[in-house]
Image: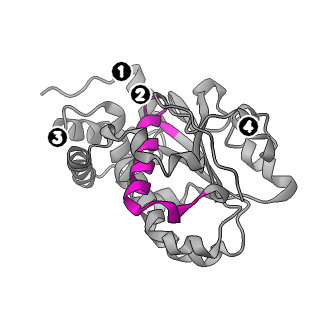
Amino acid sequence: MPPRELTPELEAILSSLPGSRGNWPLDQFQALSAKFPKADDQTLLRFLAARKYDVDKAAAMLQHHLEWRASYQPEAITQERLSRSIPSGCWRMLGTLRRDDAISLRHTGSVGVLWIQLSLWRPDEYDLAEYTAMVTFFLERSARVCQWFTVLFDMEGWRFSHGLHLRKVKSLISTLQDHNPERLRAALMLRTPGVFEASWALIKPWIDPVTAAKVHFLPKGDKETAALLEHVDAALLPTTYGGSLDAATTAVPGLPDTTDVAAAKAP
């Protein structure tokens, strides 16, 4: 099979890849595309970037992912299957921005903004299987409108009891790193309480260095809004953080081809 053509779209993606520094990994891309001729350009490049452009490691990772897709069938997960997790409103998609609208994100296409509020998390109300399915559902559906996303991770409300559910957190990390590599642009940790430190010490070793570099613990108080606006446009930033988006008007789950539900209230 002849190597894939270097189109303007592919050039734009190559030039924005983390770690490429202008040295486009075209040879590695063409080698991986020869192994996986049915994979699209962005998938190949994301898996290459996740393995620092090592073709053999990227191929092993992508093969594992394809086998997982064949057995787990993430595209078949329905909203009805997530009747206990989605209505909490803990996760919701706030919208997307095109490149021309983004502030400091390098990418082509759209970047979504995902809002996760720990004050609404009720992990004792559903099992690990539903949590994993819910995370997968969000990442799968969001890919229909955005290849990349930034997470507003509001940690206010983290309790000691949440530490009993770290298997769910580990599942989130695995689903993101193993099956959605290089889709995360930034994880913005907001209003993190001191009680989270013990849990973070256990969680951090599960995160690979590439992903860990995208986790930012933002300052509290007056500096919070300025720090957020370096990553998120004010139009997609809830007013509680100094943006212009009225959270009361946002949909849950806010994903394509889903039915809006009434979100639970924080205690």
Q: Residues within 10 Å of mark 1 (few under 14, many from 20)?
A: few
**Residue 147 forms part of the magenta stretch:** yes
Q: CA distance from mark 4 to mark 2?
A: 41 Å
x%, y% of residue 170? 44, 65
Residue stretch rendered in magenta on the structure: 121-148
User: Which mark is drawn over residue 35?
Assistant: 3
Q: Earlier in the sequence, mark 3 or mark 1?
A: 1
x%, y% of residue 95? 60, 32
Check the image and name the residue furthest to the top: 8
Residue type, label 2: Glu
Residue under circle 2? 11
Q: Residue at x 70, y 65 (%)?
A: 192
User: Which mark is drawn over residue 7?
Assistant: 1
Q: Nearer the viewer's eye, disc 4 or disc 2? A: 4
Q: Nearer the viewer, residue 39 or 31?
A: 39
Q: Nearer the viewer's eye, disc 3 or disc 1? A: 3
Judged left or right of residue 242, residue 143 is left
What secondary structure is found at the residue carrying circle 4? helix
What secondary structure is found at the residue carrying circle 2? helix
Residue under circle 4? 248
Check the image and name the residue furthest to the bottom: 198
Q: Nearer the viewer's eye, disc 2 or disc 3? A: 3
Labelled pair 2, 1 in contact (Cβ < 8 Å): yes
